[in-house]
Amino acid sequence: MSIPCDGILLGAGHNSLVLAAYLARSGLRVIVLERGPAPGGGLTTEENPRLPGFFHNTHSFFHRAITTTPWYRDLELERHGARYVEPELNVAMILGDGRALEWWTDLDRTAESFAEFSAKDATALRWWVAEFEPIVDQILTIEAQSPPLSPDRRRELLNRSRLGRRLLEIAQLSPVEFVRREFENDAIRAGLLFFNGLREIDLQLPGFGHSVPALLAGRHKAQLCMGGSARLADALAADIREHGGEIRTAAEIRAVLVRGGRAAGVELATGERIEARAFVASGLNPQQTFLELLDAGSVPHDVRERAAKFEYNLLAPLFALNLALSEPPRYKAADRRPELARAFMVILGLERFSQFAEIVSAHERGEIPPPVMWGACPTLFDSSQAPPGKHTAFLWEKLPYALRGSAAHWDAEKEEHARRMLALWSAYAPNLAEGAVLDWFCRSPLDTERRLPNMRRGDLLVGSFANGQVGYNRPFAGAGEYRSPVEGLYLCGGFTHPGGNITGLCGYNAAGVIAVDLGLRRWWPSRPVERALESVA
Ligand SMILES: Cc1cc2nc3c(=O)[nH]c(=O)nc-3n(C[C@H](O)[C@H](O)[C@H](O)COP(=O)(O)OP(=O)(O)OC[C@H]3O[C@@H](n4cnc5c(N)ncnc54)[C@H](O)[C@@H]3O)c2cc1C
């Protein structure tokens, strides 16, 4: 049976939810279809089935500057229950000798911490933050919040201003080159790269040298969603429903239907068909969208080829160890530095710049690299995620998807690896080996792909920035402005500009493009990127 609606969204990742919310508020009847049991994709919070009352954020946790995004404000997500905190000691890299490199929300405190390692690097930090703050505010933020310009037009506009030329100059470097050139201390270099690598940029790729100072200069840091990451998805879902939209879970999409060359609806795995009068928007990766869901005859041959060549990040897959605890991890280093007891993101095992080469080469060989782990104890900042007085914590490690050539090895080996991680963690926080752990479970890169098949090969960013897959050419040339080569079919997932992670900006930007194509009145403010770049000093 066919139920007509105006628009269908494939997958209920946060980008699809953001897009659906804007279009529902524009008066369209939208349906979001999700194969899993709840909307949100990477916004997942699971209750421990063995220990009710303990909640674990099994995908995203560190949400960067969410409260400053335009969609968080436009969609009134706080009215729908979303609430964020931004812990002051935002990131702490704890070294084996008990020292710690700290990133605070307050630049002065960060610079003080840098100065303990190198006075020269503390000065460089302040210099680069001052240099990049206007570039972030006047260029990079606006570019991320707008459909991408063609590379030629972008370069022409940036070349007109001093800030634009500065950005182009620094961008020519790779992050590794930038850090080597501008900072001297080994631990600081390693920390800066790792901190940046959390955004999963290919650290050796020229064209991304600006990403390190941009991250340092960003005024807002990692934030935590109170109640767990899934509460952000709940708030988005509430807004969609309030404006007449529908979200259907346990709805696996089998095919996108094309009629007269135009995307006209979908077929579910159950055989049910749903028709769309105006558009279909896909939050599913290019291979799923163009090769698996669309009939070969509906997609030009060259588009199928480009979709097939879409690449994933070698270094993005994560292995996660999740703990239910009777007390928070008590780091030995906190004896000397009590502030570490309230650190938000904690990095362990990172000491030297040269570890990057070792990690990359282990990933290329499909082997487990020397351990570098990072994570948090969410309940230090949000007691609602565990029973009274109890805690949860997790650590992640970047590990290869194809372990010794095959992801299938993970099922037999993941528990053993998790035990090794716990032993290492306990070396920094001995109470974890002294009875604080009530329960634990782990998830491998293969588990990520099984739960969220759009994160192919466990790539949590849904596609690398290499292979030209950036800006106007993300996911590939000819599909970079959220419009696909199939009429009526749009793209909105992390495989579009500005990329993966919880940013919501792929969905936000796609909403503007679809609104123009459908002739909808844009009810939300807009700031055209070309005009903004023309006015840069
Ligand atoms: C372990 C882990 C940790 C992470 N940590 C962070 C972090 O701290 N900070 C951060 O910013 N990001 C983090 N991320 C990355 C972030 O979660 C993703 O980049 C983001 O979720 C991508 O959003 P999206 O909207 O593109 O789609 P997704 O969140 O990937 O959602 C896509 C949805 O489509 C559904 N789907 C797939 N196939 C079908 C089908 N055939 N039919 C119907 N539905 C389908 C999936 O079930 C899923 O719900 C993490 C990811 C993982 C895995």
Image (cartoon, grey):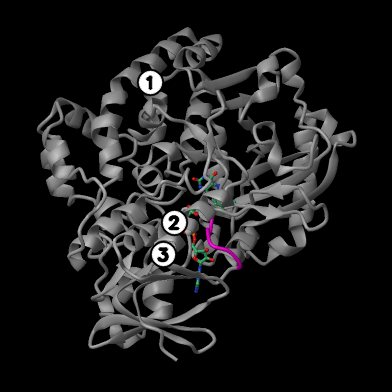
Residue corresponding to mark 3: 283
**In this picture, which residue range is highlighted in magenta?**
37-42
Real-space CA distance between mark 3 and mark 1, rounded to the nearest whole angstrom: 39 Å
Residue depth check, mark 3 versus mark 1: number of the one nearer the observer? 3
Provide the secondary structure element on which disc 1 rests: helix
Instruction: Decide whether the magenta segment is chiefly helix, strand or loop.
Output: loop
Bin the neighbour count of mark 2 within 10 Å (Cα to Cα): few under 14, some 14-19, many 20 and up.
many
Provide the secondary structure element on which disc 3 rests: loop
Residue corresponding to mark 1: 182
Check the picture and name the quadrant holding the C terminus. Answer: top left
Check the picture and name the quadrant holding the N terminus. Answer: bottom left
Identify the residue shown where x is 53% and y is 62%: 39
- The numbered dot on residue 239 is 2
Provide the secondary structure element on which disc 2 rests: helix
Which amino acid type is marked by label 3? Answer: Gly
Residue 362 higher or lower than 536, as above or below: below
Bin the neighbour count of mark 1 within 10 Å (Cα to Cα): few under 14, some 14-19, many 20 and up.
some
Identify the residue shown where x is 59% and y is 40%: 226
Does mark 3's beta carbon lie closer than 8 Å to ligand 1?
yes
Front-most of 436 and 186?
Answer: 436
* Sequence-earlier tag: 1 or 2: 1
Q: Position of residue 300 (x, y in %)?
A: 25, 80
Q: Decide if residue 62 is on the left or right side of residue 142.
A: right
